[in-house]
Image: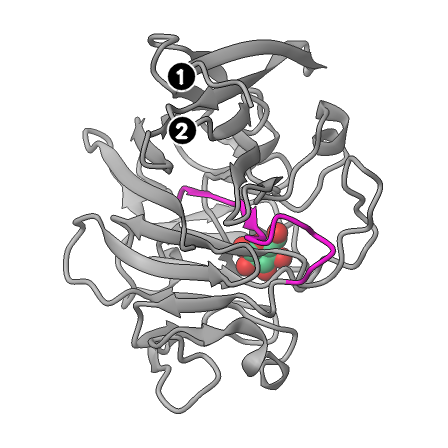
Amino acid sequence: METKTGIAKAAWGNTDGKEVFLYTLTNAKGVQVKITNYGGTVTSWVSSDKNNKVSNVVLGFDSLSGYLAKPPYFGAIVGRYGNRIAKGKFKIDGAQYTLATNNGVNHLHGGNKGFDKQVWDATIANDSIASLQLSYVSKDGEEGYPGNLKVSVRYTLTDDNELKIEYTAETDKATPLNLTNHSYFNLSGDVANTILDESLLIDADNFTPVDSSLIPTGEIKTVKGSPFDFTKATKIGARIDSVKGGYDHNYVLNKKDTSLTKAATLTDDRSGRTLEVFTTQPGMQFYTGNFLDGTIKTSQGAGIQKHAALCMETQHFPDSPNEPKFPTTILLPGQKYHSITVYKLSITK
Ligand code: BGC
């Protein structure tokens, strides 16, 4: 692997009349994360396993065409509102807003052309630091959202194999905002393996149950005594058959403030890899790739099957704009949105 620490830029095509680039972030250990300004997408995260075998731990494609075919948010920045808003409707101060509905009757992940399908502006502050700054201006009315929103995402790959994602935003009208990264992880580094043998711990005593269209019922429910309990490290496949469709739920993290705390630990015995998730956010969507069905192919041509990878999307709770009991997601003019999520990869020999 190339070992020069820093960031390199390569042309990666065009869409919407804009140039798309692929940035390679390399740390002092030779670990590489590739990110494109199309959708602010992490396309690969390549590291050695316990046997020094180098492989990619996230779902992604080698070329822009894979992303233009609209895979389900592989590695992308999701916004303006990550996850669902019931029927695409909400009110702010009595004013009714209607968003694009792109998931049955509901709004999902920002609508028809969310942040994952936009070409972001990218800046390399200093090419010897593995850090990339992306920015995007979402116009008033885009996908039905109020206000011009300026959003920035800074990705940094540290020498401790942490991928740090820092989000900031400002608006000129009150708007719901819920930003996340939608990377799909498979720590074995081989999508032919499912993630059912990987073990997960989520620091959450509660989750938000959903109705049949995956909208929270409003209840904050204990995980105790149910297949949703990951408070102790448990194999993902151990109880997945008793969860209809598989896991696709928001966990209410055990935290009282917005400090950066550990939300989850994912481990894979085959590769010896561990991935820890830290966040300032109150929730995390645990999604086991239930809607993957083999139709989407990797760049090497293999069909990506159900449960081939999983997502740990740090977030505010789905449908918060319609659930007064959930922490607010409304960003007001004059406020500065700021959140941090860190994914840390390590090897246990
Ligand atoms: C959602 C799933 C959805 C997936 C799309 C997840 O965040 O919770 O329901 O199918 O994203 O990739």
Which amino acid, mark 1? Thr
Q: Is residue 303 above or below residue 231?
A: above
Q: Is residue 117 above or below residue 185?
A: above
SS assignment at label 2? loop
Query: Which SS type dominates the magenta stretch?
Result: loop
Q: Is residue 287 above or below residue 155?
A: below
Which amino acid, mark 2? Lys
Residue 274: quadrant of the picture: bottom left
Q: Quadrant of the N terminus?
A: top right
Whichever of labels 1 and 2 marks the residue nearer the N terminus, that label is 1
- In front: 103, or 290? 290
The answer to whether residue 210 of the structure is visible from this angle is: yes
- In front: 80, or 191? 191
What residue is at 53 percent from the left and 36 percent from the top?
45
User: At which x and y percent is residue 347?
Assistant: 42, 49
Q: Can you identify the residue that label 1 sits on?
A: 5
For the record, the magenta segment spans: 179-194
Magenta stretch: includes residue 188: yes
The quarter of the rendering in which ligand 1 is drawn is: bottom right
User: At which x and y percent is residue 67?
Assistant: 70, 32
In the visual, does 326 lie left or right of 26?
Answer: left
Query: Which mark, residue 29?
Result: 2
CA neighbours of label 1 inside 10 A, class few (<14), some (14 to 19), many (20+): many
The residues bearing labels 1 and 2 have C-alpha atoms spaced at a distance of: 8 Å
What residue is at 40 percent from the left and 15 percent from the top?
6
